[in-house]
Image (tube, helix red, strand yellow):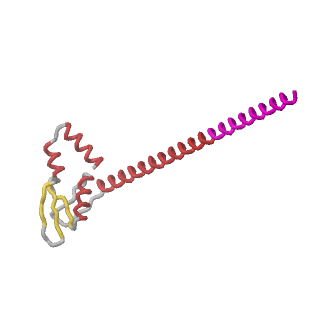
Amino acid sequence: MLLLLLLLLLLLLLLLLLLLLLLLLLLLLLLLLLLLLLLLLLLLLLLLLLLILLLLLLLLLLLLHHHYTTTTTTPPPPFTVTKNVFTQWLLLQLIAHIGGHACFTNSPCFVRISFFNGGGIICVSFMHLFFKCFNDFYGFIFKFVCFFFF
């Protein structure tokens, strides 16, 4: 009888230990789930931060675009800068980086590029020639896309 009671007690103890182990495993799973949730929250926060940065960059580009399309600067005659596209400003920046400066002639199709050694060339702006060739609906779409994205 005593042996049976001891065996029953041992079985109960084993069952309790198993229950405790199961509880510990459940707690570990809960902790893992919490960690996963925290990681997901961090990822969402990073995505939100990236979205905010992209929106700020877009706003900055729009401000620069507005600034460089509404302000007029007049280099020495007979050349004037036409107040139009952002692509012209980008071309000016590119030429400035290679050691020269450019200004747009009275016709928006031609660009005068002069270098510091005094020499100068007049070249045709490819974009404007392209725009001249495509004055139909597709050309308008291309102009619109170039104006806002290039």
Residue drawn at x 48%, y 49% is 49
Say how many tags the image has.
0
Q: Which residue lies most toward the right here?
A: 2
What kind of secondary structure does the magenta stretch mostly adopt? helix
> In this picture, which residue range is highlighted in magenta?
1-30
In magenta segment, residue 129: no
Question: Would residue 111 be found to the left or right of residue 146 on screen?
Answer: left
Question: Would residue 18 be found to the left or right of residue 78 on screen?
Answer: right
Q: Position of residue 123 (x, y in %)?
A: 13, 58
Q: Position of residue 107 (x, y in %)?
A: 15, 54
Question: Would residue 44 be found to the left or right of residue 142 on screen?
Answer: right
Residue drawn at x 24%, y 40% is 141
Query: Which one is nearer the viewer's eye here, 48 or 55?
Result: 48
Query: Which one is nearer the viewer's eye here, 85 or 6?
Result: 6
Residue drawn at x 29%, y 53% is 69
Q: Which quarter of the image is occupied by the N terminus?
A: top right
Q: Is residue 79 above or below residue 63?
A: below
Question: Would residue 43 be found to the left or right of residue 105 on screen?
Answer: right
Q: Position of residue 35 (x, y in %)?
A: 58, 44
Query: Which one is nearer the viewer's eye here, 129 or 73?
Result: 129
Residue drawn at x 39%, y 52% is 57
In magenta segment, residue 25: yes
Q: Position of residue 66 (x, y in %)?
A: 33, 52
